[in-house]
Image (cartoon, rainbow, N blue to C red):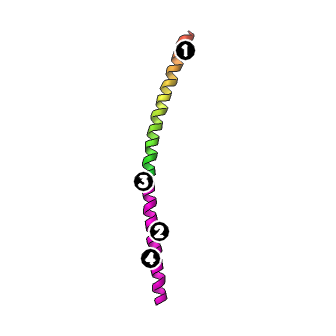
């Protein structure tokens, strides 16, 4: 019985460690997801600005070549 109790205690420690690791990983995922969302928003804004510049440049070049 002592051996079974000892194995159970060890298993309980391992379970606790894995639960703590799971919590850390879930926290990291939340943080990274928020960061990814901010980067995606910034990228979309920059791509829109770039498209505006490209359109303005093309229109200006077209006006000068007429």
Query: For the residue labelled by badge 2, is the local secondary structure a helix, a strand or a loop?
Result: helix
Q: What residue does disc 3 label? A: 30
Q: What residue does disc 4 label? A: 12
Q: Look at discs 3 and 1 and give the one toward the viewer.
A: 3
Q: Is residue 8 magenta?
A: yes
The numbered mark, 3 or 2, whose residue comes first in the sequence reads 2
- The CA distance from mark 3 to mark 1 is 48 Å
Using a 10 Å C-alpha cutoff, classify the residue at mark 2 as few (fewer than 14 neighbours), some (14 to 19) or many (20 or more). Answer: few
- The CA distance from mark 1 to mark 2 is 64 Å
Depicted 27 relative to depicted 47: above or below: below
The label on residue 62 is: 1
Q: Look at discs 1 and 2 and give the one toward the viewer.
A: 2
Q: Look at discs 1 and 4 and give the one toward the viewer.
A: 4
The numbered mark, 1 or 2, whose residue comes first in the sequence reads 2
- The CA distance from mark 3 to mark 2 is 18 Å
What is the number of callouts on the image? 4
Residue drawn at x 50%, y 27% is 51
Contact check, label 1 and label 2, Cβ < 8 Å: no
| Magenta portion: prevailing SS class | helix
Q: What residue does disc 2 label? A: 18
Residue 39 location in percent, x, y? 46, 42
Contact check, label 1 and label 4, Cβ < 8 Å: no
Q: Which residues are magenta?
A: 1-29
Query: For the residue labelled by badge 1, is the local secondary structure a helix, a strand or a loop?
Result: helix
């Amino acid at each position: 019985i002592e051996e079974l109790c000892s194995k159970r205690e060890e298993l309980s420690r391992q379970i606790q460690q894995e639960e703590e690791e799971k919590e850390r990983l879930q926290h990291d995922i939340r943080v990274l997801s928020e960061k990814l969302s901010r980067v995606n928003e910034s990228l979309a804004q920059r791509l829109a600005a770039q498209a505006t510049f490209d359109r303005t440049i093309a229109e200006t070049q077209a006006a000068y070549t007429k």
